[in-house]
Image: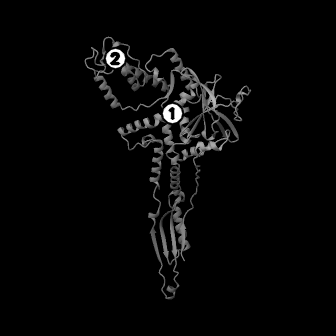
Amino acid sequence: MAATRVAKVHGIRGDVRKASIADSRGAEAEQTKYTPDQLIEPPYPLAELRKLTELSTILRQCITAYRRNITGFGVGLQYTEDLTGKEETPEMKREWDMVKAILKNLHFDKSPEELFAQVIEHREECGNAYLEIIRDGRGLPVGANNIEPEYIKMTPLGSPVDVEYVQNGIKLTRKARFRKFCQQIGTSTVWFKEFGDPRRMDCTTGQYIPDGAVISEDRLATELLHFKIGNKAYGVPRWIGQVIHMYGARKAEELNYRYFYQGRHIPMAIILTNAEMSPESIAQLEDYASSIEGVEKAHKFLVIETTAKDVDDLLMDQKPKASVEIKPLAELLQKDALFLEYDEASRKKVQSAFGLPDIYIGRSTDFNRATAETARLITEEQVFEPERNNIEWIVNNKLLRPYELKYVVMSFKKPDISNTEDLTNVIRTFIEGHAVTPNDLRELAGTMLGKDLEPFDIPEADMPIGLNEQQSNPLDSFSILKSKDVNVNLVDLLKDIRDALEEVSAHAGRAKSS
C-alpha cells in the first residue's frame, strides 16, 4: 500500500472576484421595450466598465494618453475661417473677451482643460460622459459640472417639440426630440432634461411643468449635455471587444501573484520503496522545510512511501529490498511569470482599439527619432485630431449656441509636431525663390520662440527676401535688420537679449531666496 506525505508550511489564500459583463443590446431594441417615461437599461454595467480600468494593466495608460493629447494642450479661441486675415474690429474683440470669460468661469474649481479632460476620461472608461449645464437668468449657459456616468439612466426619445435658435443672424424653428435623464444614488433620485430642451421639468418627478404653472426655482431641473461613443442611446467604449482578453490578463496576473502564496514549490521528491520513514525523520524534514528562507517558506519536499504488496513474492522467501531515491522535480515547477505572451497580445489588442503606438503609453524602447516623429504625426492626424474636432463641434454648436456668436469659436490647442529639419529646408527654398517676406516668417518665429511677435512696420518687411536692393545675399540672416531705415544692430540686439535673460535669472534667484 502506498502512502504519500507532503511536509509543508501552510500558506495564505486570497480570492479576487471578477464582475460579469452583460450582452449588448441596441438602443433601438431597447426603445421598443420601454414606455416613454420608463428608464432604458444600459447595454453594459457602467460601474463595472469603470472598475475594469483599475484592474487592467494597459487601459489606464491609453485613457491618459487620450486625455492629455486631446485637451491637455489647453483651450483656445480663434476667429471663424471667413475672418482670417481681416482686421480686428471692436465688436470682434468684445465677443472674443466674452467667450474667453465664459470658458474660464464654466467651473470655479476646475480649469476648462480639466473640465473637458474629465469628459474624455469618463467617455473612454464606459462610453458615456455628462456635463450638467447651469443657465443664468437670461437662459444662457454659464456653468458646467462633471456627473458620474454610472449613476445616470435615460428614457427613450420623447415626442417632437418646436425649438427656436438663431443661425447667422436668422431666427429658425425646427422639430427636435429629447430624452430625460435620471440620476439614482442610493435612495436619492434626481431628474435632468436633455440640453436644449425648452420645456420646464420638475427635478423630483421628471414631469414637464405646464405653461403658467408656478414652481420653486430649486425644483427646476437642470440640463445634461451627453458625450458618447457611437450613435445608440448609450455610448459603448471603443475597447468593449477586448473585455475577455483584459479579464484573462487580469487572471494571469492573479495566478502569478498567488503562486508565491499557494503554488507548490516542490523542488524534489524522496521516494522510499519497501521502507517507511520514522516519525523522527519526518519531524526533521518538516523542521528543515520550515526553516528554509523564501516567500512564505515556500519550498517543500514530497515524501512517497511504498511497501511490497505481492504476497507470492513473500511466500517464496524473497525478501523485498528497501531503497531510497531522491528525484528532482524542477522541470514541473511553474516558470517565472506565466502567460507573458498572452498578456503581451492582450496589451496590443487594447492599444489597437485606441489606435495608439507604444510611444504614447511609455514603451518607447524600439523607437528612434524618425519613427517617433512619424508615429506622432500619424496618431495626431488619425486619432487625436478627429476626437478633438468632435468635442469642439459639440461645444461650439450646442453649448455656446444660445450666445449667437458671429466671430469666435472655441478650439483645443494642438501640439507642434512639425519636423524642424524639413521645415528649415522648405523655408530655405522659399527664401531662395524670393517667395516669402520677413513678415511672412514672423508668426512662425513667434511660435518657435513661444511668444507673439508683431509684424515689422516698415516697407521692406513686406518685400520678398532677396529682392530688396539692400540685400546682397538672400540668406544673409535677414540683412534687412541691418538697414539704416530700421536702425537696428544685430549685435546690440543679442546683447540686449542677454542682459534681459540675466535680469530675469537674478530676479528669480532673489524670489527663491526670499
Q: Quadrant of residue 471?
A: top left
Question: Total marks drawn?
Answer: 2
Front position among marks 1 and 2: 1
Q: Position of residue 5 (x, y in %)?
A: 54, 70
Residue 53 is situated, as x and y percent measured from the top left of the image, at 54, 44
Q: Circle 1 sits in a helix, a strand or a loop, which is it?
A: helix
Residue at screen point 37% across, 16% down: 456
Q: CA distance from mark 1 to mark 2?
A: 49 Å
Is residue 454 positioned above or below 234 on the image?
Answer: above
* Residue at mark 1: 390
Is disc 2 placed on a helix, strand or loop?
helix
What scheme was used to colour the molecule?
Answer: one colour
Residue type of the residue flagged with mark 1: Asn
Residue with the mark numbered 2: 492
Q: Quadrant of residue 43?
A: top right
Q: Position of residue 184 (x, y in %)?
A: 67, 40
Q: Residue furthest top?
A: 485
- As drawn, is 132 to the left or to the right of 76? right
Q: As rendered, which of 232 and 98 lies closer to the eye?
A: 232
Q: Is residue 219 left or right of residue 115?
A: right
Crowding near the residue tagged with mark 1, few <14, some 14–19, many ≥20 C-alpha atoms within 10 Å: few
Residue under the point 40% across and 36% down: 377
List the single residue furthest toward the right. Answer: 214
Q: Are the two marked residues, 1 and 2, in contact with CB atoms closer than 8 angstroms?
A: no
- Is residue 71 among the parts visible in the rendering? no
- Tell me where residue 177 appears, x and y as whole percent: 62, 33
479 lies above or below 230: above
Could you say which is closer to the camera, residue 72 or residue 178? 178
Type of amino acid under label 2: Asp
